[in-house]
Image (cartoon, rainbow, N blue to C red):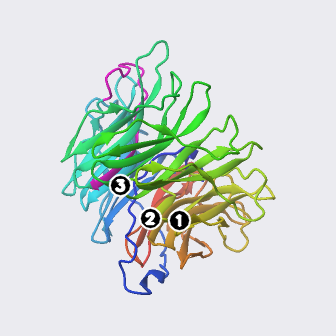
Amino acid sequence: MKFLRVSVLLASLVSVAGAWPAGAANTVPVWHAARIVSLPSGGTGLPQGYLPALSCPATGDCSAGGAYSDASGHTQGLLLGMVRGAWRAPSRLAPPANAGQDPGMTIDALSCGAPGNCSAVGGYQDASGNALGFVAREVNEKWLRATEVALPSGAAATGQRSSVHSVACASAGNCSAVGTYLDRSAPIGRTKGFVLDEVRGVWGRARAMAAPRNANINPFVVVNQLACPSAGNCSAVGSYIDSNNVAHGLLVDERRGSWQPGIALALPGDANAFAGAKLSEISCVSSGNCTAMGTYTNNAGAVEGITTVESRGAWARGAVMTMPPGAAANPHVFFYGFVGLSCPSIGNCSAGGQYLDGSHLYQGFFIDEVHGTWQAASELALPIGSPAVGHNGGVVAVSCRSAGNCSAGAAYLDGAGNYQALVANEVASVWQAGERVALPGGATAVGVDGGVYALVCTTRTSCTATGSYQSSPTNYQGFTVATS
């Protein structure tokens, strides 16, 4: 499962803890067999198995997105919608008016402020070959044509390479998004970040993200993920490089509609002088109360996981994750960035990723924060006969119904060396062994680019996930899988 091994955003829904009767939160969701995702007329498959975006603002009401190949081999934006528990016919997202013949349209993230009222973001190619970002709105269950993001003043007019990476909607018509663009510096444009807000249904012009004071002239900003607990109050994470070409974790907050300058994550005392830090995941319970995670390199050259907590608007120094017993001296911790972190209440979070064990096999892991204290990580328990998750496997998506009661999507290698999709449940703070997803049409593997991309739980027994699988040696199809 390749998962493009880059961090892109996906907005998620987390449930409020304590909303159900006593004992209900410990109910184990039962996962059904996966169903194939039908494509718009002429659709042939999913490029690189890419189906990353899922948002479920209410039980039985979800929207999903990605990309598909049409009959001409062009890449088009794919939209899926579930209404009252039933998936409707898929649709093509109409590209902006200046799109090229092959628009290269790809939905990277999607968020719904209310059922039938969502926003999608991503990238496309115009008729001149520029890579541009777009936003698209769904209003009362009808998707409107995508529009080009109006970049900040000083953006390159030609040779542009911009994209919108993440979007989060606090309510219908009130969303925020983040991305990157090239400015018009010669001879090579500088890679900068931008922020973008939708207020009462109107997307404004993108504004340049203010980088930390020690940023390089070309900061090479990467913005991975965004969370907005309320309208005008958001937090985003990513990375940038400083004047010594060292990568730092980047934290950017919006407060009451005003975006603050970015700050660098303060690293643990054992951080390497060239720590190469980056932040891949974020989840916010309320304004100014968020959790983020990523990786850094320590003095011994080991790539470790790191967590940081924002409390009342102040970000704490990063704390090192403790990997499962028997981890390699250099565990090479990795997060896919497809919403692998979920925090149902302050001080209670669950997350997952990938690491190397002492036998230098790639494994998946889970890690939980309980009442404000991060526990040691535990290894993802695989089906019998499966030795490891593989280089392209591990935990990708996590969603929690309440503290210690979550579900996750992953991928792993079976005994025959084929990648398979997997779902796992956490019950009363104990992660259960994962179970293989039964694929549509008798398919036997998800391939290196397939697996579960996104997963959302809205009630104690209702979860929905999306992903892709290998339908032929050269083609991928999408699937949905749900609980009862």
Please, what is the three-letter code of the amino acid marked with disc 3?
Ser
Residue 138 as seen in the image, left or right of residue 409:
left
Query: Which quadrant of the view contains residue 87?
Result: bottom left
Local SS, label 3: loop
Q: Marks 2/1: CA distance?
A: 7 Å
Residue at position x 65%, y 64% from top?
377
* Horizontal and vertical percent position of residue 36: 44, 63
Front-most of residues 241 and 388: 241
Pointer 2 with pointer 3, Cβ within 8 A: no
Q: Which mark is residue 372?
A: 1
Front-most of residues 390 and 480: 390
Instruction: Judge whether residue 163 is colored magenta.
Output: yes
Residue at position x 32%, y 29% from top?
151
* Horizontal and vertical percent position of residue 56: 34, 63
* Horizontal and vertical percent position of residue 232: 28, 47
Local SS, label 2: loop
Query: Which quadrant of the view contains residue 165?
Result: top left
User: Is the stretch drawn in magenta largely helix, strand or loop?
Assistant: loop
Q: Residues within 10 Å of mark 3 (few under 14, many from 20)?
A: many
Label 3 sits on residue = 287
Please, what is the three-letter code of the amino acid marked with disc 1?
Gly
